[in-house]
Image (cartoon, rainbow, N blue to C red):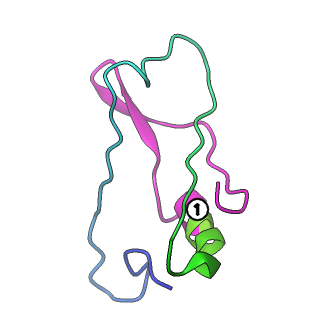
């Protein structure tokens, strides 16, 4: 199981995944945003991928605010969420 091959090679490259919606993510107050990961052929890898994506040593989750990228307060994994 590899998601961008974390730490597997010495040549670590930056990858970005942007989620955008003109209205959906325009929040005036604090909120919880949940992503559910699915893999139609390798269902057994979903929980591991979610854990890797929640690991702040490997992945930074942030949002754009006031012209800057602001990291989310908390990123957790609960199974595939």
- Residue 74 or residue 26, whichever sits in front: 26
State whether residue 23 is above or below residue 38.
above
Residue drawn 26% across the image and 71% down it: 13
Q: Quadrant of the C terminus?
A: bottom right
Mark 1, other Cα within 10 Å: few <14 / some 14–19 / many ≥20: some
Any magenta on residue 57? yes
**Residue drawn at x 55%, y 70% as measured from the top left:** 49
Total marks placed: 1
Task: Note whether 30 is above or below 41 in the view shown.
Answer: above
Residue drawn at (63%, 42%) of the image = 74
Determine if the magenta segment contains residue 76: yes
In percent of width and height, residue 65 lies at 37, 22
Relative image position of residue 33 (x, y in whole percent): 58, 36
Considering the whole magenta stretch, tell me its main secondary structure.
loop
Quarter occupied by residue 23: top left
- Secondary structure category for the residue under label 1: loop
- Seen from this angle, which residue lies furthest bottom? 9
Q: Position of residue 63 (x, y in %)?
A: 41, 33
Residue 4 is left or right of residue 14, and the answer is right
Task: Decide: is 4 above or below 63.
Answer: below
* Magenta segment: 52-81
The residue tagged 1 is 55
**Closer-to-camera residue (30/24):** 24
* Residue 80 % position (x, y): 65, 61
Residue farthest top in this picture: 28
> Which residue in the rendered view is the most extreme toward the right?
78
Residue drawn at (59%, 71%), measured in percent from left and top? 46
């Amino acid at each position: 199981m590899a998601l961008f091959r974390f730490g597997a090679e010495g040549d670590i490259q930056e990858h970005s995944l942007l989620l955008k919606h003109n209205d959906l993510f325009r929040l005036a107050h604090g909120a919880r945003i949940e992503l559910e990961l699915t893999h139609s052929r390798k269902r057994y890898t979903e929980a591991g991928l979610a854990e890797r994506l929640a690991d702040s040593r490997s992945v930074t989750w942030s949002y754009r605010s006031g012209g800057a990228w602001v990291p989310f307060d908390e990123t957790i994994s609960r199974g595939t969420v």
